[in-house]
Image (tube, rainbow, N blue to C red):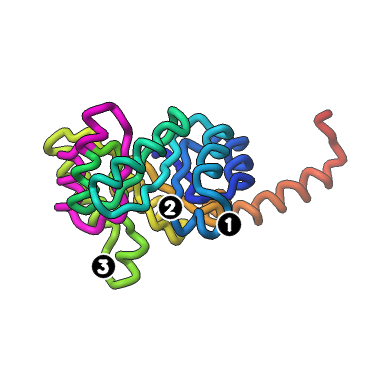
Amino acid sequence: MKFFIDTAEVAEIKTWADSGFLDGVTTNPSLIKSSGRDMLEVIAEICAVIDTPVSAEVAALDHPTMLKEAMVLKDIAPNVVVKLPTTLDGLKTCRHLANIGVRTNLTLCFSANQALLAAKAGATYISPFIGRMDDINLDGMNLIRDIRNIYSSFQFKTQILAASIRTVNHVSDAALAGADVATIPASILGKLVHHPLTDKGLEAFVNDWKSTGQTIL
């Protein structure tokens, strides 16, 4: 499974890029707003930090304007992935961009039918929002499983990008459900490695080693 970081904070991206675990970045209008910075400047700076996919989202809702915005975004850097809403206009824009070789990420997906249409439109990624589904007592992981079954049955190349990750369990559950990618907030990324039994075991090993009076170096 690939790990994308879901942020518009360049410092966070630099930190995780140095870890060697980061496979890409996703942003959205809300994250850009939180950064307090100009969107085009932020995307350009992120793309200068990391050469893996960086999702940048259009703001328009109609196909003609989406297409114009997409052309601006894709020219920022070669690793920009144009993020589009999973609507009819978004799908139309996706099809046009796919035909000219521009990678896309169809966001705000909440049904297998939407995912099927996105794949038929040539989307590079489909982003089911599992956390938001859980918020209204729907099972986001079942949606990922359904999409995986459909994509595998028809050999679609669209990658499933699990979004709206809220917990560490969301990450492992999404992997088990067949997601290709998880886009994860920095706060959750930092928790993936931690386990209380690891900490407890390490403490015991360190204390026992100290009691031997030995050194390796």
Quarter of the N terminus within the rendering: top left
Instruction: Kindly identify the amino acid type of the residue bearing the numbered disc 3.
Output: Leu
- SS at badge 2: loop
Q: Earlier in the sequence, mark 1 or mark 3?
A: 1
Q: Amino acid at mark 2?
A: Asn
Q: Quadrant of the C terminus?
A: top right
Q: Please give the residue where the numbered disc 3 appears in the rendered image.
A: 138
Query: Is residue 119 part of the magenta span, yes or no?
Result: yes
Badge 1 element: loop
Residue 116 among those drawn in magenta: yes
Q: Position of residue 42 (x, y in %)?
A: 55, 44
Tag nearer the camera, 2 or 1: 1
**In the image, which disc is placed on residue 36?**
1
Q: Which mark is residue 28?
A: 2
Residue at 63% x, 42% y is 15
Q: Residue at x 51, y 58 (%)?
A: 33
Name the outermost residue toward the right. Answer: 213
**Mark 3 crowd level (few <14, some 14–19, many ≥20, 10 Å Cα):** some
Q: CA distance from mark 1 to mark 3?
A: 33 Å
Q: Amino acid at mark 1?
A: Gly
Q: Which residues are magenta?
A: 95-122
